[in-house]
Image (cartoon, grey):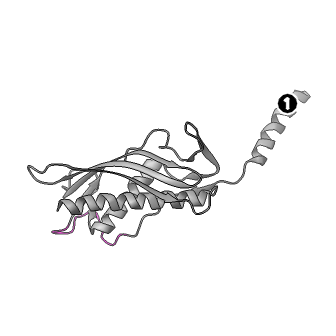
Amino acid sequence: MKHGPWCVFPMLAILAGCASNPDQSVYVLPAPAIANSGLRAIPGGLALKLRPVILPDYLDTTDLVTRTGQYKIEASRTGRWGERLSKGVTRTLAADLCHSLQATLVPDGPAEIPSLQIEVTVNAFDVTPAKSVLDASWTVVQQGDGNTPVTGHGEFSSSLAQPGSDLAVVAAMSETVAELSGGIAATIRADK
């Protein structure tokens, strides 16, 4: 079977498209090493459960997204997340909270009853050329009858060290998540 010259053009277009794409870097939000991150709670210590963090749908992706205008967002061509952003924020926030509160993370399932149960909703997490801004609300429920849930809200921001750099975006977002962790920890400490 003989192919005409029309078969060559689509193949050349595909090869040209592949050649023009830059290499992509894959990023994750960092989490501090936790000495007491076992599955069992420390006797007499805090055991916390963090529900999966809720993010706006347009952010809950593996795309590294920045806001380029009031109504426009843009995915990076050179960087992406190694996991959905909601998973990364949940993992990092849980590690930060366990570290700062000297607590143990309780896994999902009926085996452990947490001292604290935390729910976090991220209302906005935007990165502009200058900074990262995170707006979030949280609810903390302590174990025991009659405990009223404690709520908090905050807006946290971090400057970008090098505008236009994927690594600077990731670093600023990481700092902003750490600030959120500090806000939640302050709410918990104030309620004690």
Q: Residue type at mark 1?
A: Cys
Q: Position of residue 83 (x, y in %)?
A: 49, 51
Residue 180 in the image: above or below residue 52: below
The spot of residue 137 in percent (x, y) is 33, 47
Question: Is 105 or 101 nearer to us in this picture?
Answer: 101
Which residue is label 1 attached to?
7
Q: Residue at x 44, y 54 (%)?
A: 88
Residue 77 visible in image: yes
Residue occupying the point 87% across, 34% down:
8
Q: Which image quarter holds the N terminus?
A: top right
Q: Is residue 52 visible?
A: no
- Residue 30, image x, y percentages: 47, 63
Identified at 15% across, 68% down, the residue is 44
Magenta: main secondary structure equals loop
Q: Residue at x 55, y 39 (%)?
A: 70
Which is more toward the observer, 149 or 153? 153
What's the magenta region? 34-45
Quadrant for the C terminus in the image = bottom left
Q: Count the marks: how many?
A: 1
